[in-house]
């Protein structure tokens, strides 16, 4: 059985790291339908999205590969969790940058070893 709960509001929190800037956007989404397993929500202008209840407050890495100095993470949450999600997204972005840095350092070592053998 599904129902509409007009008092429940959702927000998409997005953290974007672009070269030397880190910015957050918080966009309200309207609840259209609630079932036992998921919510159907929609932004002011856009398509309907289904969010499974267990995925609420869970960060998602939006960038599938690092390119042009840009990384992006987002999460859907209720208003009372916005600050918590901003911190989680910030941590996720920091972890991603550290992982890329470690990989690049390994690449530099490999290049150095190869060039010294020439």
Image (tube, rainbow, N blue to C red):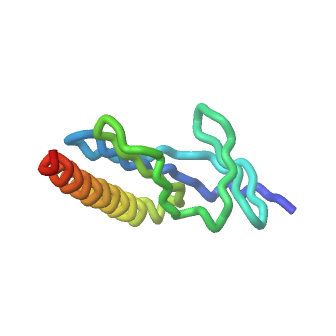
- x 25%, y 52%: residue: 107
- x 71%, y 50%: residue: 40
Q: Image quadrant of residue 106?
A: bottom left
**On the rendered structure, is 15 left or right of 19?**
right
Where residue 103 appears, x then y in whole percent? Answer: 29, 56
Tell me the quarter of the image containing the C terminus: top left
Where residue 79 appears, x then y in whole percent? Answer: 49, 59
Where residue 116 appears, x then y in whole percent? Answer: 12, 50
Foreground of the two, 67 or 24:
67
Q: Vertical placement of 96 versus 21: above or below?
A: below
- x 33%, y 63%: residue: 91
Foreground of the two, 102 or 42:
102
Q: Image quadrant of residue 63?
A: top left
Count of numbered labels shown in the rendering: 0
Foreground of the two, 18 or 79:
18
Tell me the quarter of the image containing the N terminus: bottom right
**On the rendered structure, is 4 left or right of 57?**
right
Q: Vertical placement of 92 versus 26: above or below?
A: below
């Amino acid at each position: 059985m599904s129902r509409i709960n007009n008092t429940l509001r959702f927000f998409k929190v997005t953290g974007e790291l672009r070269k030397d800037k880190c910015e957050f956007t918080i966009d309200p989404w309207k609840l259209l339908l609630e079932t036992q397993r998921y919510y159907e929500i929609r932004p002011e202008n856009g398509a309907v999205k289904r969010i499974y209840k267990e995925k609420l407050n869970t960060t998602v890495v939006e960038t599938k590969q690092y390119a042009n100095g840009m990384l992006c993470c987002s999460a859907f949450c209720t208003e009372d969790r916005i600050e918590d999600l901003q911190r989680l997204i910030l941590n996720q972005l920091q972890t991603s940058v550290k992982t890329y840095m470690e990989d690049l350092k390994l690449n530099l070592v490999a290049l150095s070893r190869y060039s010294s053998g020439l």
